[in-house]
Image (spheres, helix red, strand yellow):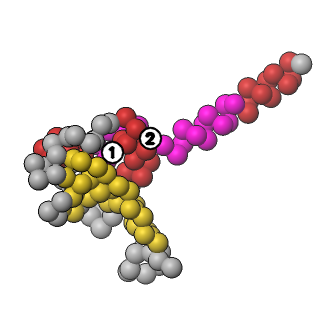
Amino acid sequence: MKTRYIRSLMVCFVVIIMISCGEKKFEKTGWTAKTDSNFPPNKRGEMLSDLLSSRKLVGLKYADVIALLGTPDGIDSSSVSYEIEIDYGSDIDPIYRKDLYLFTTRDSIISSYEIKEWKKE
């Protein structure tokens, strides 16, 4: 009986560790810290889920987004974007890309967001 209890606790402990390894809490310094100017910050992919679940992005003003996430990687008339992951494989052309797009109203308020993924076929 005691062995089964210990075994169950060990399984729970391993599952908790596995779940927590793939996701990190959002924090601005990790989100903005680039080690290579050609790639997005390393921790963005791990922080994305927490960012979207713990922060209310819709309704924020553009200036508040910049204060929270830093300078966007892309800006156009109706959205700003942040690179999350880019994989170049063994070539100079990307084979995978994941970006967070924040769509803005004419008043520069975030109206919605979308995660866009692209994979070379």
Q: In this view, does 104 lie to the left or right of 100?
A: left
Magenta residue span = 12-33
When the figure is inspected, residue 29 is found, relative to residue 97, above or below; the finding is above
Kindly state the secondary structure of the residue where label 2 is placed: loop
- Is there CB contact under 8 Å for labels 1 and 2? yes
31 or 56, which lies in front? Answer: 56
Q: Residue at x 86, y 23 (%)?
A: 3
Residue 40: name its quadrant: bottom left
Kindly state the secondary structure of the residue where label 1 is placed: helix
72 or 37, which lies in front? Answer: 72
- How far across and how far down the image is residue 20, in percent? 54, 38
Residue closest to the far top: 2
Q: Is residue 48 left or right of residue 82?
A: right
Q: Which residue is drawn at 33% across and 64% down?
A: 39
Q: Residue at label 1?
A: 30
Mark seen at residue 24:
2
Q: Residue at x 37, y 34 (%)?
A: 54
The label nearer to you, 1 versus 2, is 2
- How far across and how far down the image is residue 74, in percent? 22, 63
Q: Residue at x 17, y 64 (%)?
A: 76
In the rendered structure, which amino acid carries the disc numbered 1?
A: Gly
- 87 in magenta: no
- How far across and how far down the image is residue 47, in percent? 40, 45
Residue 29: name its quadrant: top left
48 or 33, which lies in front? Answer: 48
Give the prevailing secondary structure in the magenta stretch: helix
Q: Using the numbered discs, state the Cα–Cα distance from disc 1 to disc 2 in whole angstroms.
A: 10 Å
Residue 1: name its quadrant: top right
